[in-house]
Amino acid sequence: MVLLNFLSPIYNFAPYPWNLLGIVPLVTGITLNLMADAAFKKARTTVKPFEISTALITTGVFRISRHPMYLGMVLILLGIAILMGSLAPLMIIPIFAILMELVFVRTEEKMLEKQLGSAWTTYKNKVRKWV
């Protein structure tokens, strides 16, 4: 994103001081990731993609998103893009989200369904995937 911003900034949509609004999604994303990571540690299950989970976490940030860490990463990227203020870095965000969906989310959800069965299905029907 930073390289793209300097090579091809395209359009400065958020000049100073408006670019400082990027702090909001940046801090929100970091907070989501830290809260999700703490929940994984508390449940003594893995945070690593593609490893077998030993617990289904349905509390805290997992009440609003089945994948709060990926959501947090997207918010971090959004915050950085706004802080840079140019349009070019914003183009990375949907590409990143699509890659996370295709490479990680779908595989992880299949693994969780296979391992956790009806508990996963019930949770999946109650909580949205991203937001």
Image (cartoon, rainbow, N blue to C red):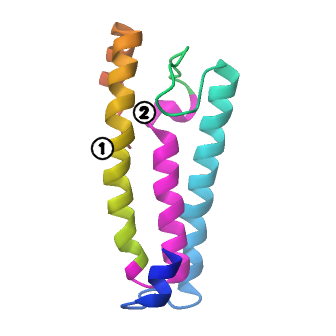
Which residue is rendered at x = 38% and y = 21% of the image?
111
Which residue is rendered at x = 50% and y = 22% of the image?
58
Query: Circle 1: is it few (<14), some (14-19), or many (20+) Cα within 10 Å?
Result: few
What SS does tag 1 mark? helix
Measured as percent of width and height from the top left, residue 90 is found at 39, 73
What SS does tag 2 mark? loop
Residue in front for this viewpoint, 91 or 34: 91
Magenta: main secondary structure equals: helix
Magenta run includes residue 77:
yes
Image mark for residue 66? 2
Measured as percent of width and height from the top left, residue 104 is found at 39, 39
Magenta residues, start to end: 60-88
Measured as percent of width and height from the top left, residue 70 is found at 47, 46
Is 130 placed above or below 76 here? above
Amino acid of disc 1: Leu
In space, the residues marked 1 and 2 are separated at their CA atoms by: 15 Å
Which residue is rendered at x = 66% and y = 43% of the image?
34
Image mark for residue 102? 1
